[in-house]
Image: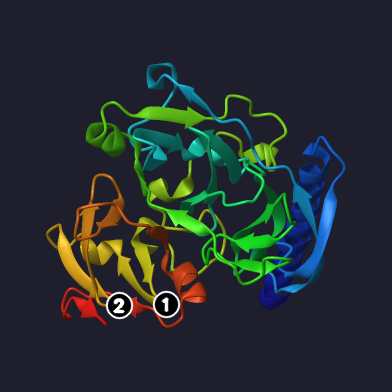
Amino acid sequence: MKANSIIKQLLILLVLFSCKKELEYNSVLDASSKEVTTINLVAQDWPGTDPKPYDMPVLKGLDHLTFNDSSELSLKENDLVLGIEIEDESIAIPLTYLEGFEVANFKINEHSYLVTWCPLVGSSKLFKDQSETNNAGFDFGFALVNNNLLMVDRQTQTVWNQLSNKAIHGKRKGETLQLEPSIQTTWQFWKDKHPDTKVLINTDTTNAVFPSEVLKEPFYTKWQPSDGRYFDSGKHDINNLGLGIEIADASVYFPLNTLFKNQSPIEYTLANTTITIHFNTEGLTAWATNSKGELIPTTLAYNWAWKNFYPETTLFSSEKKHSHD
């Protein structure tokens, strides 16, 4: 009897999940102000599912981020931001404003950029738009690869994967997006480090890809327990977060819970390149600089997600020699 009861409960949960999935999927399509185009490829249509041939809806990415006075925004000390230094400007992009969009385009001094936020893998990344047509921009692909965000460039309809930085389908398949240096951290840490920082947000939150997620707090600041594998967005944990770096086809991953037991900074050699790893517990973050002290491109992401795309990565241990040639 007890076994039958458990089975019934599981069936009920499965039905509820399917209904929720259909409702959320339809709300996504209804939220698009224009006719939805699709691209046929092999991908996941929902987190945790198996990849399959799929007509992926392409929804408009966010455009026209604007600078705002931080004093007029409701930013909390531990709000996650993507901190960037470009065009001689220090800029913070609060991730709460990207929760319902995940893909946003903006322009600084005639140069076009793409900022992405994938809550499933805990990673925000900045890319330089290298389209032949300046400011062509990117849109949101309503599908996943290894539970990770897909973006579609408007110029060629090529599909790009966020964590690998690579084109996985379309005219530019196999090419790599130009990843720009950034620091994913808390608002308080970035503001203390850059007191003159500007804040770049989308003031218009209409037509979001995920309307129910608009202005939600990025979840990994909640310190909820997890076993390190993808399950759902409420089960992730800072203890599964780390810094991934790729140089010349070699990669290394620095778990934050390992870094936080050491003294910052740490020197490390990857692909015959000496880099310095910096980390900060209060800022829930880590970043890397080169021999000139310049910020280099890195990725903050969950351990399982990084390993999915970089299976041969070296896992940093403070007990090992700090090099990998």
Q: Residues within 10 Å of mark 2 (few under 14, many from 20)?
A: some
Residue 149 placement: quadrant = bottom right
| Residue occupying image coordinates x 38% and y 51% | 181
> Where does the image place residue 13, in percent across and percent down from the top left?
71, 61
Q: Which residue is at the front of the view, 224 or 6? A: 224
Q: Is residue 240 left or right of residue 100?
A: left
| Residue occupying image coordinates x 64% and y 51% | 132
> Where does the image place residue 39, in percent across and percent down from the top left?
81, 61
Amino acid, disc 2: Ala
Q: Residue furthest top?
A: 72
Q: Residues within 10 Å of mark 1 (few under 14, many from 20)?
A: few
- Residue 276 seen in this snapshot: yes
What is the secondary structure assignment of the residue under circle 1? loop
Residue 322 placement: quadrant = bottom left
| Residue occupying image coordinates x 46% and y 81% | 311
Tell which circle, 2 or 1, labels the residue nearer the N-terminal end. Answer: 1
Residue 154 versus residue 158 in the image, above or below: above
Q: CA distance from mark 2 to mark 1?
A: 8 Å
- Residue 122 seen in this snapshot: no
Q: Which residue is at the front of the view, 76 or 173? A: 173
Residue beneath label 2, please? 271
Q: How many marks?
A: 2
What is the secondary structure assignment of the residue under circle 2? loop
Q: Are marks 2 and 1 in contact (CB under 8 Å)?
A: yes
Amino acid, disc 1: Asp
Residue beneath label 1, please? 249
Q: Which residue is at the front of the view, 267 or 117? A: 267
> Where does the image place residue 217, in percent across and percent down from the top left?
49, 39
> Where does the image place residue 8, in percent across and percent down from the top left?
75, 68
